[in-house]
Image (tube, helix red, strand yellow):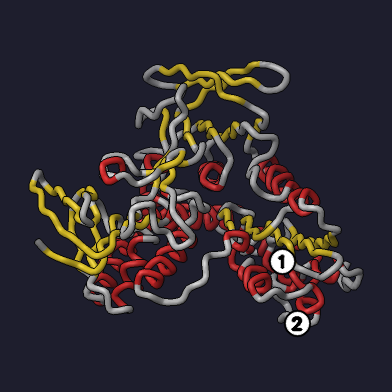
Amino acid sequence: MEKYNLIILGSGPGGYVAAIRASQLGLKTAIIEKENLGGICLNWGCIPTKALLKSAQVFNYLKKASDYGLKINGYEKDFKSIIDRSRNISSSMSDGVKFLMKKNKIDVIKGHGKILNGKKVEVENNKKKTIVEADNIIIATGARSRELKNIPHDKEKVIGYRKAMSLKSQPKKIIIIGSGAIGIEFAYFYNAIGSDVTILEYQKNILPLEDEDISKQLERNFKKNGIKIYTNSEVISVEKNSKIISAKFKTEKKEEILSADIIISATGIKSNIENIGIEDVGIAVDNDKVLVNDFYETNIPGYYAIGDITKGPALAHVASAEGILCVEKIAGHNVQKLDYDNIPGCTYSSPEVASVGMTEKQAKENGYDILIGKFPFSASGKAKASGNSEGFVKVIFDKKYGEWLGCHMIGEGVTDMIAEAVLGRKLETTGYEILKTVHPHPTMSEAVMEAVADAYGEVIHL
């Protein structure tokens, strides 16, 4: 029986990052994966979706070429090639993880892993079973699309994100149930390449976890581009035949029926914790989530869990951060627990959305006397020159101490800008420190400085 210091179940951005950090710290490490290295993120999530979205963005640029003084004739989209490009990029990224495993001398064990008592793992591959053991085990098995009870996936007419990014042909009409990041990104992609898209959202706003000003701006943008949006809407049932599928839903005012070629269900995720031995070992679970302490150890010593199967935000960068902290704690380092109040969230539609910290509503509910600043990209020279002047930056500060409570952005490239706010909040930066930090001109990032200036009554370019 092979013995390791650490065995990790799952090779997504939590698992493979944890494995590399463990190897750096001198731990003999193995990672168990039943599919492709990189998990959902690299193979069916973060990376391939961004490839699809880039194709859609370039296609939009071609349609608007005349806005830039360019004349382009005869262009068209090739749906199969768009999908193939996405899959090829995904494959190359998975190969990159394979290289990193080899470089860091991490054993990759192919197959389905099931944890056992005594810090052992049974691995089944092609009906052959082997057992490995370790001093510590990290469970990083990720999550999958959650299915509504009354609308189960059938892989043909009602599909999740995995099928939605590998269709053989482009649907003419699509209904998307749910408007979190996944639903919004698919709505943008398919609308941009010419599909008729309708969003059904149970909450009162799309992107319901974002600041309300952001949600409303994105809704205006989407509607302007032809996406139909129904909020405060509950899907009651679906009916399908060989050609179309119909969704019956009710709003605050009435019941309606819409028909489409497919329905994409984007109503959240469900943890992959079935059939991996959780119950047999006695690891505590609450509502689909493995219970862990501040350093990701379960109630059974030596067994840990990170990523989407725990109660933190289901984001790739969170899983990676958790994996690193978990391994460093196992290795005996003196580590600080992760600050979940300073986790950035990003939605990669066009316009993009990025945020960190409290929304305006949350700040008020927490009793803060707040300062709010906003700066529209319509007043940004760089945004105007790039032809992407929609959106704004919104900042929220505590009036008494100047604490940066929240930052919310919508516009071109804002997912690359939000790190300034994350770092500023980590360093407990005040509004005046941001205001007195010289930002380069012309850049989109100037909008952060200008929004802060607006909060303090010192804005120049408004």
Q: Which residue corresponds to the image point at 85% horizontal and 62% vertical from the top-left?
A: 371
Of the numbered discs in the image, which one, if any, rests on residue 437?
2
Secondary structure type for disc 1: helix
Tell me which numbered mark, 2 or 1, is placed earlier along the sequence: 1
Q: Nearer the viewer, residue 423 or 402?
A: 402
Q: Position of residue 258 (x, y in %)?
A: 56, 22
Q: Nearer the viewer, residue 348 or 77?
A: 348
Q: CA distance from mark 2 to mark 1?
A: 21 Å
Instruction: Determine which of the numbered discs, if any, sits on residue 36 in the image.
Output: none
Please provide percent x and percent y for residue 66: 65, 58
Which class describes the residues within 10 Å of circle 2: few (<14), some (14-19), or many (20+)? few
Image position of 78 (left or right of 461)? left
Image quadrant in which the C terminus is located = bottom right
Q: Amino acid at mark 1?
A: Ala
**SS class, disc 2:** loop
Amino acid type, callout 2: Thr
Question: Hey, which residue is sitting farthest right in the picture?
Answer: 457
